[in-house]
Amino acid sequence: MVNNSWGINPRFVAIEEQNEKTKSAHHKVWAFLFTKFFEQLAYRFVDILNTVRVVSSCIYINGNLNYAVSAAHQTLNLA
């Protein structure tokens, strides 16, 4: 049913507007998930760097790999 002189169905326009809102909402959700994923990835990367730093500093100070691994374990458990 056409309700105006241009031949545009207002119901169709309303459906298209709702589709655009849904697309926008989906984009926002994916953007949020994408951001959270890379945020967690960055945190894991920092954890790995801190572990390497602790192990390397313990090896440099004590020359003992077992002590270094133990110290790194304690550091990760506290974090």
Image (cartoon, rainbow, N blue to C red):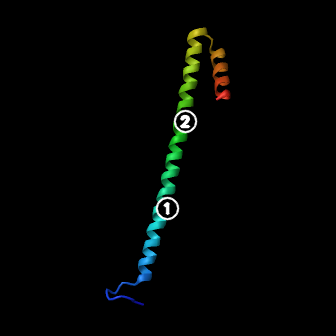
Residue identified by numbered label 2: 43
Looking at the image, which residue is at 64% across and 24% down?
Answer: 75
Secondary element under disc 2, as helix, strand or loop, is: helix
Residue identified by numbered label 1: 25
User: Which mark is drawn over residue 34?
Assistant: none
In the picture, the quarter occupied by the C terminus is top right
Judge whether 45 appears above or below 66 on screen: below
Q: Quadrant of residue 48?
A: top right
* Residue that protrudes farthest toward the top in the picture: 62
* Residue that protrudes farthest toward the front in the picture: 4
Instruction: Give whichever of discs 2 and 1 has the lower sequence position.
Output: 1
Secondary element under disc 1, as helix, strand or loop, is: helix
**Would you say 69 lies left or right of 34 here?**
right
Looking at the image, which residue is at 44% across and 82% down?
Answer: 11
Looking at the image, which residue is at 36% across and 88% down?
Answer: 4
**Would you say 66 lies left or right of 26 here?**
right
Residue 26 lies, in percent from the top left, at: 49, 61
Which marked residue is nearer to the observer: mark 2 or mark 1? Answer: 1
Judge whether 45 appears above or below 19 on screen: above
Looking at numbered disc 1 in the image, what kind of residue is underneath it?
Ala
Judge whether 63 appears above or below 52 on screen: above
Residue 77 lies, in percent from the top left, at: 68, 28
Looking at the image, which residue is at 41% across and 78% down?
Answer: 13
Q: How far apart are the alpha carbons under marks 2 and 1?
A: 27 Å
Q: Residues within 10 Å of mark 2 (few under 14, many from 20)?
A: few
Residue 67 lies, in percent from the top left, at: 66, 15
Looking at numbered disc 2 in the image, what kind of residue is underneath it?
Tyr
